[in-house]
Image (spheres, rainbow, N blue to C red):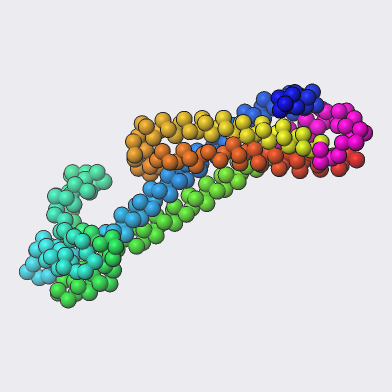
Amino acid sequence: MIGRLLNRRAPLLPRDAGGEPWLVSLIAVLCFLACLAAVGAVAADRAAHGWARQLRSEATVQVRPRVGETGAEAAARAAQTLAGVEGVAEAEAMDRETAEALLRPWVGDAVLPDLPIPHLVIVRLDRTAPASAVTLSRALAEAGLDAAVDDHSLWRGEVERSATLITVLALIAFLLTAGAAGAAVAYATRAGMAAQAAVIETLSLNGATDEAIAGLYQRRYGLLAAGAGALGAAIAMGLIAGLRALGGAGGVTPALPLSWSDLLILSPCPLLAGTVALVVARVTALARLKRDH
């Protein structure tokens, strides 16, 4: 029965009347881009919060040796002192070889032998009850050590602000995509109604209400947009699944770690596309009908 009803409506809204082929392509592309933006935002947010958790669980201490004391001795004494502080899981002095290995990619081998490298202690904090920078500084001062504690709060704040910015940009991209899809549906609706002006006039003369006529257009373009949204989401799912399989748990880059659960984010895309098209088509059709009366 549903098939017969749809077939009866086909002459009223022929597929080419509103430029439907290009509309399907346009909405599919927009949904594809929106899906990529959504997954990219989720992946970037996941990476940023992972980095923030790592920064929150560590602190760095720069030790300045006293007169008659080497930097290595001062760092070792600071590590021993901090290891006994409540809220510290582990404290380890960084030797020169490790520091040079970290600097080598940035400065090269030529200047490393003559480069003054600070004496650092890497402190791994207890994740459940981490020690504060004030606590660490007090313990070092009581041990007679001249040291500066960096709890990475500055970098952590920057990372978290970057995650928030990415989320906001993704939301703006989604709204722009929805607006572009809505504008395309509105244009297609007006074009379809212009092509079917005689049919619409006949229906009106035979007692069809504006709401009933608008319902035909909202149904047509709602279903069309839902199908196009499903197509765009399917292509995006295929691309993301390929990147996840290619890059593993870390994705293709540590800045965008992908997860299989990210594919679930794309499942509402056909419903959202259909809803936007349905609302826009109904509002556009009713406005056009009221203007023509």
Q: Main secondary structure of the magenta part?
A: helix
Total marks shown come to: 0
- Residue 219 appears in view: yes
The spot of residue 160 in percent (x, y) is 41, 56
Residue 140 position in % (x across, y down): 19, 71
Quadrant of the image occupied by residue 199: top right
Q: Is residue 282 magenta?
A: no
- Image quarter where the N terminus lies is top right
Instruction: Note whether 211 is above or below 4 in the view shown.
Output: below
Q: What's the magenta region?
A: 184-212
Q: Against 137, is 281 above or below? A: above
Residue 31 position, x and y percent, is 57, 36
Decide: is 113 above or below 185. Answer: below
Nearest the viewer among 145 and 47 is 47
Q: Residue 166's spot in the image, x, y percent?
A: 48, 49
- Residue under the point 28% across and 65% down: 130
Name the residue located 70 percent from the left edge and 39 percent from the top edge.
278
Which residue is at a point 64% across and 38% down the rendered structure image?
274
Q: Nearer the viewer, residue 96 or 142?
A: 142
Kindly give the residue lying farthest to the front in the view shown: 1
Residue 127, quarter of the rendered image: bottom left
- Name the residue located 13 percent from the left edge and 65 percent from the top edge: 80
Residue 121 appears in view: no
